[in-house]
């Protein structure tokens, strides 16, 4: 049988990292750190594509034979092409990116951006982790350890739930019923 990129039999070779439209410097610094890149290499990860938003790429980081190939950019009209090409997505905890990644049936590690003023990302990431949709990383310095567990499938994809497709017809049906445009309401 053919395995899809999100199936547990498919090894993780290409990671897409996204911070969205804000700054998430600690995540970018971690991704470009020598220890994280070495761990990626040891896990067989060959490519990192990094969307860095308003963050800065640390100096002194170059591709070598002992690190994955790294491609980076600040913004793109759509992240979907990058998400589709990846085996795993490492994302900030923003709702839009999380749901987009999950609807594409991608393995996902969500990193809480503690650099933001409120704690909404932590709450969302925690709730989605509890429901087994993604792997949560509440402290960016734990990302390497979580990545290793995901790659070694100690907390493998088979334990993750897939997000159901959204029911886009429900809102329209309620509006039609309320305005008397559709079927009559049962009383």
Image: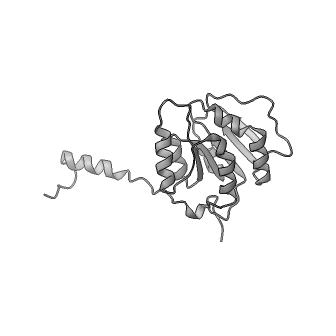
Residue occupying the point 68% across, 39% down = 50
Residue occupying the point 67% across, 35% down = 28
Residue occupying the point 46% across, 50% down = 127
The C terminus is located in which quarter?
bottom left
Q: Residue furthest bottom?
A: 1
Q: Is residue 184 left or right of residue 23?
A: left
- Let me know if residue 105 appears in the view: yes
Task: Tell me which corner region of the image, top left, top right, bottom left or bottom right, holds residue 92.
Answer: top right
Q: Residue furthest left?
A: 187
Q: From the top left corner, tell me how far across and down residue 89 is, in percent.
A: 62, 48
Q: Is residue 38 left or right of residue 52?
A: right
Q: Is residue 63 left or right of residue 78?
A: right
Q: Note whether 45 is above or below 157 in the view shown.
A: above
Is 159 or 82 nearer to us in this picture?
Answer: 159
Q: Note whether 177 is above or below 54 in the view shown.
A: below
Q: From the top left corner, tell me how far across and down residue 183 is, in percent.
A: 20, 55
Q: Note whether 75 is above or below 112 in the view shown.
A: above
Q: From the top left corner, tell me how far across and down residue 3 is, in percent.
A: 65, 65
Residue occupying the point 45% across, 57% down = 164
The N terminus is located in which quarter?
bottom right
């Amino acid at each position: 049988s053919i395995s899809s990129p999100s199936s547990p039999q498919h090894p993780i070779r290409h990671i897409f990292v996204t911070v969205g439209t804000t700054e998430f410097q600690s995540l970018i610094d971690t991704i470009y750190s020598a220890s994280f890149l070495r761990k990626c290499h040891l896990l067989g990860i060959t490519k990192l594509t990094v969307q860095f938003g308003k963050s800065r790429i640390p100096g002194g980081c170059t591709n070598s034979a002992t690190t994955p190939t790294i491609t980076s950019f600040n913004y793109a009209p759509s992240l979907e092409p990058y998400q589709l090409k990846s085996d795993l997505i490492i994302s900030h905890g923003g709702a839009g990116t999380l749901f987009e990644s999950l609807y594409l049936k991608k393995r996902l590690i969500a990193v809480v951006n503690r650099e933001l003023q409120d704690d909404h990302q932590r709450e969302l990431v925690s709730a989605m982790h509890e429901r087994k949709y993604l792997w949560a990383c509440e402290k960016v310095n734990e990302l390497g350890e979580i990545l290793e567990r995901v790659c070694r499938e100690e907390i493998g994809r088979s334990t993750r739930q897939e997000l159901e497709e959204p029911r886009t017809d429900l809102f329209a049906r309620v509006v039609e019923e309320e305005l008397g445009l559709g079927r009559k309401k049962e009383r």
